[in-house]
Image (cartoon, rainbow, N blue to C red):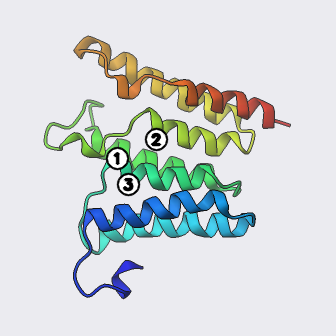
Amino acid sequence: SISSTVTTAPTLEAYGAVLSCLARSVRWYSNERQKEATARQAESLLQEMQDEYHIVPNTLLYAHVLHAWAQTSAPQAGEHAEAILNHMLRQYYDEHKTPRKDLITSNKPNNYCFSAVMTAYAKQGRVQKVQDLLHQLQRLYEGTQHHGEDPDFLPNAFCFNALIEAWANNN
């Protein structure tokens, strides 16, 4: 916890630096338990910044945590990552599935966030989950076309690579 080592309230930038380091460090661990523990620590810090300091994470901070989960092979990595993505979607969209006008778009989910969740499921060979997420992203993109296409929702090569990886890991 950052709060145990700092005497003043941490900032968005401070959390960003720590989350970035945690997300990048996951790939260097050879022990899967260390990878999972680091992803959990990143997720815990994301929650702490919201609960204790009322700091709203931006897309990049969410993406760091999603990336950490995507690098693990933990059995529940996909579920953890998808829960974070769903939280982002609930924050960004209102009950009518249109972007909320009272929020800035700094925490808007994007194709990178979706691809990280897809990658987490792909490592487990969960083809249907990856396909469902890809279809959801495509629907979001298609839903923005009448308001002007939004490239943040355009499925990219990472999304399709995750689908290929899921098929390769499917037993």
| Residue corresponding to mark 1 | 59
- Front residue of 160 and 81: 160
- The spot of residue 78 in percent (x, y) is 61, 49
The answer to whether mark 1 and mark 2 are in CB contact below 8 A is yes
| Residue corresponding to mark 3 | 61
- On the image, which quarter does residue 86 sit in? top left
Q: Earlier in the sequence, mark 2 or mark 3?
A: 3
User: How many numbered badges does the structure rendering display?
Assistant: 3
- The spot of residue 127 in percent (x, y) is 70, 32
Q: Amino acid at mark 2?
A: Cys
- Front residue of 9 and 44: 9
Q: Earlier in the sequence, mark 1 or mark 2?
A: 1
Q: Residues within 10 Å of mark 3 (few under 14, many from 20)?
A: many
Q: Residues within 10 Å of mark 2 (few under 14, many from 20)?
A: many
The answer to whether mark 3 and mark 1 are in CB contact below 8 A is yes
**In this picture, is 171 found above or below 39?**
above
